[in-house]
Image: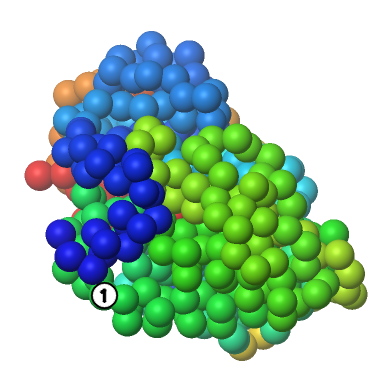
Amino acid sequence: MNEQFLLRMKDMLKDEFDDYLKAMDDPMHKGLRINTLKWDVDSFKNSQICEYTPTSLSEFVFEIPEESKLGKTIEHHQGLFYLQEVSACSAVEVLDPKPGDFVLDLCAAPGGKSTQIAMKLEHQGLLISNEIDSQRAQILLSNCERCGISNAIITNSAPEVLCPVLEGCMDKVLVDAPCSGEGMFRKHSKAMEDWSEAHVKACALRQKRIVDEAVKVLKPGGIMVYSTCTYAIEENEEVIDYLLQNHPEMELLESTERFGRAGFDSGKCEGSKVRRIFLMDKGEGHFVARLRKKEGTAKELKKLRTASLHKAAVSFLKDQLDYELKSVMINDKVYLAEEFYDLKKVRVLRQGILAGEIIKERFEPHQHFYSSALLEGHYLKITSCSHDEMIKYMQGEQLNKSSPKGFTGIEYQGHLIGFGKSDGTIIKNRLPKGLRQR
Ligand code: SAM
């Protein structure tokens, strides 16, 4: 490991430095969070997909053995859980989103915390999940889709573009900031290779720019949670100090959760109010602080006007669904949601559920329509499959199975895995190629 880094850690941890070094050789902490939009604790336990140990953080978050390989299981594909280490789940527990809240997740990819926020919103209110990097934004999009989220807007913009548009509109904002990743050295060796004191300072500067923007979006009384997965004081307590110095409308609150340990005093940042997790605290590295906007002006997001749909989309929805949502068509794509919002010049990748697309006057459904947790129980055309059929389907094969003609959701053990188009005796496979398992 980088000598300069070790010197800094020794200076920070003092007598505990040797414990930190020892902990670096321990097995990595791995975690699983149940997606309560689709699954429950009893079903997880009965599934026996892995060994697990409950955690004190949340009844839905479990420690799982380091060697668990769950990313290719059918339950993962169905969006029943998200692989998320326990300390990475702590920030959203502190943010504490409630059904009906308007929440911005400003630095969101790959989506661990966004999908956790969405499950706490229980389909009510709005999640704006933003990622600046366009490739990472696609991963965020696919994770939100897999987890069946319906009340989210996925955006791909810089905070400087997005936050002014959301000014005064949000109840909560999560800033899970890009950082030097010192707490992730065991997981991502690249973070270790990239480390330098200059990089820590550059990250701190960027974090200050991001929180300057994030403050804007809050309504008076709104809550911000700032988190990182690094140990550097410059990127943690000093960013909170900067925020308090430069935004007198913000106050630091006591963390609602008592995981890990207190942080360090730094200027206006009281160490006793923030939380840190070191490897010795039975988690990978993390920092969490909770703040409140005392004053400001509340505004409302402008709603998007909806217009009538193409007749092929209307007839598809009538044929497939016994549930009504608002709909919009943008560039031949049809979206469903309880409400749509106008985010002006922000780059919006998805709003609500992408039901499908009009191609040559016909309606072609999208996987998101069949992975939505909100629509579960409301599909009118479902074909159940056996274990062998599920394997074939996931490999991209057609199913030789009688089923009413037309589009049908494909279900395995109570949850949809995709869709197909039946001619009465054969169901042609419509699982997107990127989701097939060879
Ligand atoms: N919250 C995510 C989760 O739980 O899966 C992890 C977020 S990661 C720690 C930080 C993210 O911030 C990265 O995806 C990175 O691309 C993004 N980022 C990088 N520079 C940024 C900037 N200037 N403004 C906002 N986000 C940025």
Q: Is residue 192 above or below residue 383?
A: below
- Where residue 190 appears, as percent x and y from the top left, is 19, 65
- Where residue 427 appears, as percent x and y from the top left, is 27, 40
Question: Mark 1 CB in 8 Å range of ligand 1?
Answer: no
- Where residue 44 appears, as percent x and y from the top left, is 41, 20
Q: Is residue 134 above or below residue 355?
A: below
Quadrant field for ligand 1: bottom left
**Classed neighbour count for the residue bearing mark 1: other residues with Cα under 10 Å, few (<14), some (14–19), many (≥20):** some
Classify the position of the C terminus by image quarter: top left
Quick check: 70 left or right of 95? left
Q: Is residue 341 visible?
A: no
Q: Is residue 317 above or below residue 204?
A: above
Q: Secondary structure at mark 1?
A: loop
Residue type at numbered disc 1: Ser
Residue at the limit of the structure toward the left, as seen here? 438
Q: Is residue 270 above or below residue 22?
A: below
Residue at position x 41%, y 63% in the image = 232
Residue at position x 38%, y 49% in the image = 13
Q: Which residue is mark 1?
A: 196
Front position in the image: 409 or 315: 409
Quick check: 433 left or right of 84? left
Q: Is residue 235 visible?
A: yes
In this picture the colour scheme is: rainbow
Quadrant assignment, res 310: bottom right
Quadrant assignment, res 48: top left
Front position in the image: 180 or 321: 180
Residue at position x 59%, y 86% in the image = 160
Residue at position x 64%, y 79% in the image = 212
Quick check: 342 left or right of 65? right
- Where residue 3 appears, as percent x and y from the top left, is 18, 65
